[in-house]
Amino acid sequence: MCIFAKDLEFAWRPGATVVAVSEFELRLGDSVFLQGESGSGKSTLLGLIAGIIQATSGELNVMGRPLGAMNAAKRDAFRADAIGVIFQQFNLVPYLTLLENVLLPCRFSPPRAARAGPTNASRKDAALGLLDRLGLGAEAREGRAVSALSVGQQQRVAAARALIGAPSLIIADEPTSALDAASRDSFVDTLLEEAKDASVLFVSHDAALAPRFDRTESMADMNAAFAPAAKGA
Amino acid sequence: MTLVALAWKSARARAGATVLTLIAIALSTALVLGVEKIRAGARAGFEQTVSGADVLVGARSGGVNLLLYAVFRLGDPTANVSWETYQAFAARPDVAWTIPLSLGDSHGGFRVLGTTDAYFEHYRYGDKRPLGFALGVAFDETRDAVLGAEAARELGYGLGDDFTISHGIKSAAFAEHSDHPFTVVGVLRATGTPVDRTIHISLEGMEAVHEGFVGGAPSAIGRRPRAPRSAPAEALTPDAITAFLVGLKSRAAALRYQRDVNTYRREALTGVIPGVALAQLWRVLGPAEQALRVVSLLVVAAGLTGLLTMLLSTLNERRREVAVLRAAGARRRDVFALLVLESTLVAGLGALLGATVLNTALAIVGRGLEASIGAPLGPLGLSVYDAYVIAGVTGIGFALGFVPGWIAYRRSLSDGLTVRI
């Protein structure tokens, strides 16, 4: 099991519960499309799974590790080792080169660095290989500035960074919302192809993407803390 | 890529603000170091000016005042010591040597000092170093003059050149003693003391210049006897001198000698032990030195405040960057360390730059500056004090980094994985 959550709750302060999930599972190697509007608590749920914030109550295991029993530093280390993250936009550190951005997780996680390659040169080759398959090899070899890339290219660099060093789980938070339909489809296809050995948790409000995934979940159905407000609206 | 490299690239990405902050810190560091070098230099200069003399005697005045006008040529003498009194104190059995000092005239802005051969023989400066001749010899005849190194260089005089001296200390004084030209017979080696800025003539020469002057102005009657070029010394014995330095056979006798001077009944005198008077001078100057130091430290504080302002103002644009780093596996303490490192780097580089600029500038213009402030600067190159200041500024930069570091650390929790713009 990649993700297992039971009676998971999170509140920024008492009485203001934003996430209340009675049960959620993601099996190893599976891909889940998680549909949810903004404000549905999906970003908070992703923060919980990534170990950046900690649940108020309930059980949350990622890759068999109970996040509730780990301190912040251990969760940070665990995230660096096991999880690749892609944001909606602004995924890149502007003052690093394309290649440096992709190799960033290797800086923070020795296991991922080791899986990417035994030496700096081999890790660089691995990153270039990923970028080649994502169609950005030439730009990376040119040493092009991150700011000179289009939004679609930036998202693909972010995908390469999430994938480097073969993390077990890829979390993508609305990665296609800034892309047009054509680049959106090719982005999702490439991501799923490259991440076929990992589990993928893909969040989007765009239902058209759902058929490409093994399974679809709806935040509105899953999050008891969000549902009443949605019904009232 | 190490965190240091990451911090460096982050600072470089905001080059404009970073460079301006760097310059502010560099300038303030240079100011602190410069103030200290001038302060230490002035102090060392004063302390090196006179050594080996046990007692300085002059007319009744404050000890510091006497030291300033007689040895440092700062300010004007208040009154004179009569020749008879000088003779009486010079003839005491416990006296090894005396150097009479007669001041009051100038040439080209340089003080003229009437004295005797004893000056070249017994005067000591710095680490008990004697005066030496770069050119020529000591004065022998009435019209001979020996120039300090700087006086010779600035006036452009060499051996054999003639000049006249004027009464008073203004270089443009109207009363030039034009009837009595002096001839340069010697130039002293540079000492880094007021000796360099002094023109030395014999007491007889001094007296010859003033003959025919009553009360400091040319006599209306016009009695102007033209003294022969080598007048007999007896005929030109001065009535009074400004002060005299005394070397005793035993240093232990200095206090008794000083007491005898201060209680002398026939004339109101002041005797000071130069080291004691210097210590008094430092006590007087201490608060001023402290004030100067405090001001320069406040300037450094302003520079470092600029650093803090810069870091705090970039925190918002960093939120995105921090979220990306966190998503890529950065721990919260990495985020904290990144800001502390950047702060330390900018402060440290700024301080290093300031020290380098100051020391380079001093190496280039140091000599001219020494001449214009009349005191040698501290030793060139990085001193221990410089190293302390650089380390101090870097350390404060490190500590200041905790403020934005802590804010970013706190924020990286509430922001979570959401990238807020």
Image: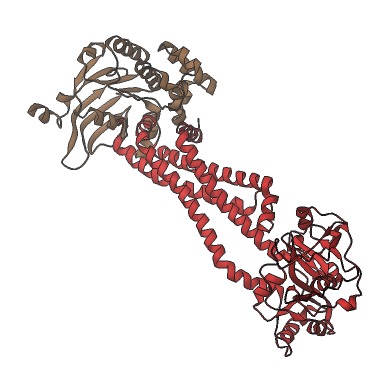
At 80% from the left and 80% from the top, the residue drawn is: B239
Residue A102 x/y as whole percent: 43, 22
Q: Is residue A211 left or right of residue B305?
A: left
Q: Residue at x 46, y 23 (%)?
A: A97
Task: Locate the N terminus of chain A by quadrant.
Answer: top left
Viewer-proximal residue among A202 and A169: A202
Q: Nearer the viewer, residue B41 or A21?
A: B41
- On screen, residue B133 versus residue A178, left or right, reads right
Answer with the quarter of the image where residue B138 lies. bottom right
Q: Report the quarter where the C terminus of chain A lies.
A: top left
Asked whether residue B4 is in view, the answer is yes
Task: State the image coordinates of residue A54 (x, y, percent, origin top left).
Answer: 28, 37
- Tell me the colour chain A is drawn in: brown
Q: Residue furthest bottom?
A: B265
Determine the colour of chain B: red
Q: Is residue B396 above or below residue A191?
A: below
Q: Position of residue A105 (x, y in %)?
A: 43, 27
**In-image side of A69 versus B230 (left or right):** left
